[in-house]
Image (spheres, rainbow, N blue to C red):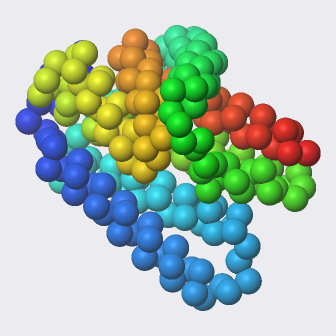
Amino acid sequence: MYTKDIKGKWGILDVLLVLAFIFVLTNIFTWLTAGLIETLVITQKYLISTVFQTTAVILALIYFNIIKGVTWKDIGIRAENPIKIITYGILGGILLFGLVVFAGIIMELLLPIKPSLQPFAKLVLEAKDFNDLIVLLFIGSVLAPIGEEIYFRGMVYPVFKEKWGLFAGMIISGLFFALLHFDILRFFPLLLGGVGLAYIYEKSRSLFACMLAHGLWNGVMILLLYFSAN
């Protein structure tokens, strides 16, 4: 599987350096853009920030390819079996959505503190028209899944799998995924989501299935939030 593909090519230090690069590039260029264009509304700022984040991930991928000798297939960008990819992507996305929602309900019943909405969820609820919805769907269902899946499942998960094995690799990469969403009250549902996406990656052998599942999960959430408010 993937362990043999990545052995010796990149490790934990590499994924941490890529994370720092993504954080710095995204924040600096988003700040500069917001300073230069003062008329930007919050939806446009989110779009620009996500574009820079995805761009940073792709630049890191190019670095891996040129400096580390990592091929795109090593990362999981492969489409040899489109039927399998679509099947795991669609079914996986539906199951992930249900799993995360169910886990969220359980956490709300167990925790005495009612979790506040995430900033992006608030933005969806405050969307003024259909144009805002399209932009938010593009951010949450296209751009974010591309960048996050390349990083978390393509770069991070194979390192943890190589170091600690299949099962532990899924759990630890899921923990890493949940931690970097900076939402302690939704940590467990996000952990399950991260583990589920690693499982989809392992079974489909393609990041495209993960992107599709992640995008479907996010998209359904966005649509439910939007129509509940409108």
Quadrant into which the N terminus falls: top left
Residue at horizontal 86 percent and vertical 39 percent from the top: 227
In which quadrant of the rendered view does residue 157 lie?
Answer: top left
Q: Is residue 170 left or right of residue 58?
A: left
Closer-to-camera residue (186/29): 186
The percent position of residue 192, horizontal first and vertical second, equals 44, 24
Q: In this view, does 43 lie to the left or right of 174?
A: right
The percent position of residue 226, horizontal first and vertical second, equals 81, 43
User: Is any part of residue 113 visible from this angle?
Assistant: yes
Q: Is residue 158 left or right of residue 13?
A: right
Q: In this view, does 44 lie to the left or right of 33?
A: right
Residue at horizontal 55 percent and vertical 58 percent from the top: 50
Residue at horizontal 71 percent and vertical 31 percent from the top: 220
Closer-to-camera residue (212/68): 212
The percent position of residue 211, horizontal first and vertical second, equals 53, 32
Residue lying furthest left: 8
In which quadrant of the rendered view does residue 149 lie?
Answer: top left
Quadrant into which the C terminus falls: top right
